[in-house]
């Protein structure tokens, strides 16, 4: 088990390194000079060159790459071009907002998706199964910003229950609508995955035995079948961390939440490469951790699975 | 069935936009704004109301369908093509080339897709084709993985061994004996993926790094009018519905196709 975890952590670090490398190459081959962006369109070539020298942009690409990795190894993400701060400090100040949004958002996905999945699987083909399946389809087919704007109109404007956006003093009320926007779209995936796996499990012999010996229907589902059917759902939570980080720019933009998404969005606007790199790095780490956690939770749910 | 109806509806709207649209989508009407300079709510002349510049919203949504579908089809077509080539090459030749290709695919899945798309689109000055290309670069990985798994299974079949015994060149084997086996899966991907591409285009345009105004695109309409959400909610509601209908349509149609053709291609 320990050996397995160590191997997976190493593989994860390798994946993160690859993502950093790809981003590094992508952001540095773009046909825009960051020094020119900072100096402004009317700056003289001398000024642009001196800013470029200050930032180390006049060094060849491999040198900059090695320097960046050397910094990373010392937990130094570099300095922002646009703001005179350390990227590490920027990430640290934006991370809590995104983490809260992630936890509440994924909680919403599960709270909406799992009941839908269970309800539609107990009687496959029934009218409510068809209605719920369509609801799940609409969920996965609706962009988060549309859900978000509709929620703002309904629950912040028509019924002023929640703030229109922003962060305020950071209380949970500011996260309800963003979390629901994340939750509605994601719930569709969970509902569909859980439905197909639960339908499969409910057909198995041991569930039929339970039924034959008179176990109540509710108990058949919750005590016997659900635990086996949850495995693909757990795997999906692992993948979902990555999907969530992909959508976080849009959701934070809709609700003006000052998280990592806003940080990356503002950095992209002014081509603040170290900050973009920092955001991508954190995102990749989330993806790797998500997959790792999913794999580590499996044996607890299903003792038949063992890692060596 | 519902999926087919929705797909026909959207494709029909896009194809017949010049006939169906009551007005020129880019024309600003003198009476298109109220006396206070606000967009007009739906009425008998402007069926879905007008936008911030006094243009007919229905016409803009109908022409927006063309943009959405063109990008969806082109982006997803390119994505399926890249994914198929990578999957077939990696699955058939395996070895170091296959490992390299699939490792690269894995890394791309750990990549925050939207961040990549936004960064590329923001840097490359978005045009219709750039947006389509960016979406394709993000979406091909899912196709590549599924095709890779299928090709691994196909290449173990006896008839592939037989082609080697017969001395058929590798390229011929791939083209005439491997790829035809994948046609149905690729067809399903080509349908299901349109939905993903349409959603991604909408998100990019919503952020302002997708299709640029005055070209009507659904995400772009919402981007321009979201600050008027409370006074002109129809400007967000109707384009939003258009996105949902298109995406649900292709999703349902693709799933139905997959069930009918009995090919397992999980996303």
Image (cartoon, helix red, strand yellow):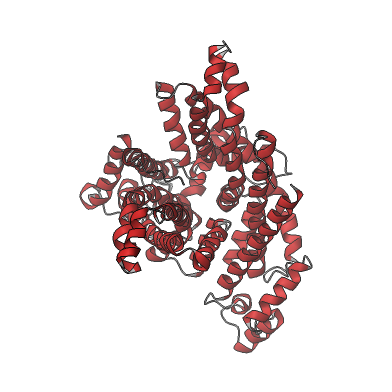
Left or right: B128, with A181 as reference point: left
- Where in the figure is residue A302, as x and y percent of width and height? 65, 34
As rendered, which of A13 and B175 lies closer to the eye? B175
Residue B147 vertical placement versus B166 (above, below): above
Residue drawn at (27%, 47%) of the image: B11
As rendered, which of A305 and A183 lies closer to the eye? A305
Specify the farthest residue to the top.
Answer: A214
As rendered, which of A136 and A157 lies closer to the eye? A136
Specify the farthest residue to the bottom.
Answer: A46
Specify the farthest residue to the right.
Answer: A74
Residue drawn at (59%, 67%) of the image: A23
Left or right: A138, with B179 as reference point: right
- Where in the figure is residue A77, as x and y percent of width and height? 73, 67
As rendered, which of B94 and A143 lies closer to the eye? B94
- Where in the figure is residue A69, as x and y percent of width and height? 71, 71
Is residue A223 something one can see in this rendering? yes
Residue A188 vertical placement versus A3 (above, below): above
- Where in the figure is residue B45, as x and y percent of width and height? 27, 42
Residue drawn at (43%, 41%) of the image: B237
Left or right: B133, with A297 as reference point: left
Query: Which corner quadrant of the image does residue A45 belong to?
Result: bottom right
Specify the farthest residue to the left.
Answer: B19
Total residue callouts: 0
Residue A34 vertical placement versus A168 (above, below): below
Is residue A85 something one can see in this rendering? no
């Amino acid at each position: 088990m320990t050996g397995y975890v160590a191997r997976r952590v190493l593989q994860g670090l390798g994946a993160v390194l690859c993502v950093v490398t790809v981003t590094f190459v992508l952001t540095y081959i773009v046909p825009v000079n960051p020094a020119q962006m900072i100096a402004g369109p009317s700056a003289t070539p001398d000024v642009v060159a001196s800013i470029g020298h200050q930032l180390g942009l006049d060094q060849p690409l491999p040198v900059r790459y090695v320097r960046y990795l050397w910094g990373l190894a010392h937990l130094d993400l570099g300095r922002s071009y646009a703001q005179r701060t350390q990227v590490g400090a920027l990430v640290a100040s934006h991370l809590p907002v995104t983490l809260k949004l992630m936890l509440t958002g994924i909680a919403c996905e599960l709270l909406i998706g799992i009941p839908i999945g269970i309800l539609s699987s107990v009687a496959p083909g029934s009218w409510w199964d068809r209605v719920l399946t369509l609801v799940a389809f609409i969920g996965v087919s609706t962009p988060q910003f549309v859900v978000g704007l509709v929620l703002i109109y309904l629950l912040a404007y028509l019924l002023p229950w929640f703030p229109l956006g922003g962060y305020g003093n950071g209380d949970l009320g500011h996260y309800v609508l963003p979390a629901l926007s994340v939750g509605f779209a994601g719930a569709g995936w969970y509902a569909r995955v859980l439905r197909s796996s639960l339908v499969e499990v409910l057909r198995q012999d041991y569930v039929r035995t339970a039924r034959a010996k008179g176990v109540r229907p509710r108990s058949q589902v919750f005590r016997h079948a659900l635990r086996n059917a949850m495995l693909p759902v757990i795997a999906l939570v692992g993948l979902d961390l990555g999907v969530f980080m992909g959508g976080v720019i849009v959701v934070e933009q809709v609700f003006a939440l000052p998280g990592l998404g806003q940080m990356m969005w503002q950095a992209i606007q002014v081509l603040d490469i170290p900050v973009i790199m920092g955001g991508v790095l954190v995102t990749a780490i989330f993806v790797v951790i998500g997959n790792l956690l999913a794999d580590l939770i499996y044996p607890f749910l299903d003792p038949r699975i063992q890692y060596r | 069935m519902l999926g087919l109806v929705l797909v026909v509806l959207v494709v029909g709207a896009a194809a017949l936009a010049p006939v169906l649209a009551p007005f020129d989508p880019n024309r600003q009407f003198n009476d298109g704004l109220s006396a206070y300079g606000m967009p007009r709510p739906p009425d008998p002349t402007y069926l879905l109301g007008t936008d911030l510049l006094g243009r007919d919203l229905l016409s803009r949504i109908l022409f927006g369908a063309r943009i959405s579908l063109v990008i969806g089809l082109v982006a997803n077509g390119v994505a399926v093509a890249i994914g198929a080539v990578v999957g077939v090459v990696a699955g058939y030749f395996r070895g170091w080339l296959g490992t390299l290709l699939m490792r690269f695919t894995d890394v791309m899945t750990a990549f925050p897709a939207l961040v990549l798309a936004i960064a590329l689109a923001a840097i490359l000055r978005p045009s219709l084709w750039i947006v389509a290309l960016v979406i394709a670069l993000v979406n091909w990985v899912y196709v590549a993985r599924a095709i890779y798994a299928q090709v691994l299974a196909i290449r173990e079949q006896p008839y592939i061994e037989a082609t080697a015994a017969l001395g058929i060149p590798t390229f011929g084997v791939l083209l005439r004996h491997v790829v035809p086996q994948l046609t149905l899966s690729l067809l399903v991907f080509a349908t299901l993926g349109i939905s993903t591409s349409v959603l991604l285009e909408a998100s990019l345009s919503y952020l302002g790094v997708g299709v640029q105004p005055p070209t009507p695109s659904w995400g772009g309409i919402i981007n321009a009018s979201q600050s008027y959400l409370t006074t002109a909610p129809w400007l967000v509601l109707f384009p939003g519905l258009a996105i949902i209908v298109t995406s649900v349509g292709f999703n349902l149609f693709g799933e139905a196709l997959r069930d009918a053709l009995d090919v397992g291609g999980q996303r």
